[in-house]
């Protein structure tokens, strides 16, 4: 550094900063803020696109994607959620899709039935009994040659879907 009578404080500081750029010092400068900690991202990008859901008229009881496609129809149609065995999950596992707020249809055999009037039953015990009896006959409501009448989705299908998501 150059020291002379004409050098001012600004010039001295400038010279010291300039020299510090070219000389290596072993002393680390104190940071004002700590270095940022790497954070795991909330969303991991993937090169594989999400699969499209198949049509609801596909008979595939062991595949989770058609089950998701049938379940999606219940949320889109404003289906009134009933208790088991007439809830959306049980009906979707047996091949039924929602076509209206209180009507379901088989995607394969196109058999339909309405659940209209169940919400009008005031006595809770009677309503539960009616829902239970209707739930027992769900397989028989499919056409005689419908595959859903023989085999519905296994009980662990929904757990498989949630484990993959």
Image: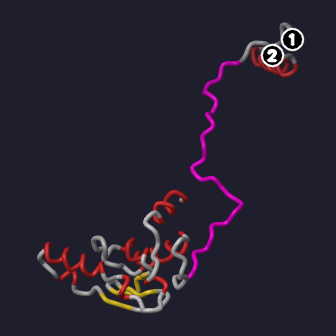
What crowding class fits label 1: few (fewer than 14 Cα within 10 Å), some (14-19), or many (20 or more)? Answer: few
First reached walking from the N terminus: tag 1 or tag 2: 1
Q: Quadrant of residue 65?
A: bottom right
Residue 31 picture location, percent across and down = 65, 23
Q: Residue at x 17, y 83 (%)?
A: 120
- Name the spot of residue 67 as percent of width and height, x first: 49, 73
As drawn, 25 above or below 90: above
Q: Which quarter of the rendered picture does the N terminus lie within?
A: top right
| Residue in the picture at 45% in, 74% down | 71
Magenta region, main secondary structure: loop
Instruction: Decide: is 111 above or below 121.
Output: below
Q: Position of residue 46 (x, y in %)?
A: 68, 58
Q: Is residue 28 left or right of residue 105?
A: right
In reply to whether residue 33 is colored magenta, the answer given is yes
- Which is more toward the observer, 27 or 140? 140
Asked if disc 1 and disc 2 are in contact, CB closer than 8 Å, the reply is yes
Q: Which residue is mark 2?
A: 16
Residue 121 lies in the magenta stretch: no
Q: Residue at x 84, y 16 (%)?
A: 24
User: Which is nearer the eye, 87 or 79?
Assistant: 87
What segment is highlighted magenta in the picture? 29-55
* In this picture, residue 116 sits left or right of residue 47: left
- Residue 48 appears in which quarter of the rendering? bottom right
Picture coordinates of residue 164 (x, y %)? 55, 59
Q: Which of the labelled discs sits on residue 82, or is there none?
A: none
Q: Secondary structure at mark 2?
A: helix
Q: Which residue is mark 1?
A: 1
């Amino acid at each position: 550094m150059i020291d002379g009578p004409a050098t001012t404080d600004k010039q001295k500081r400038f010279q010291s900063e300039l020299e510090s750029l070219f000389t290596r010092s072993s002393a680390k400068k104190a940071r004002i803020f700590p270095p940022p900690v790497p954070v795991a991202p909330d969303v991991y990008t993937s090169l594989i696109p999400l699969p499209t859901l198949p049509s609801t008229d596909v008979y595939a009881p062991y595949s989770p994607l058609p089950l998701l496609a049938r379940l999606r129809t219940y949320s889109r149609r404003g289906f009134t959620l009933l208790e088991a065995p007439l809830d959306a999950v049980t009906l979707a596992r047996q091949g039924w899709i929602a076509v209206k707020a209180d009507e379901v249809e088989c995607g394969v055999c196109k058999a339909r039935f309405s659940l209209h009037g169940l919400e009008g039953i005031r006595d809770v015990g009677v309503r539960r009994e009616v829902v239970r009896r209707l739930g027992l006959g769900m397989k028989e409501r499919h056409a005689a040659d419908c595959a859903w009448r023989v085999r519905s989705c296994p009980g662990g299908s929904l757990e498989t879907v949630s484990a993959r998501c």
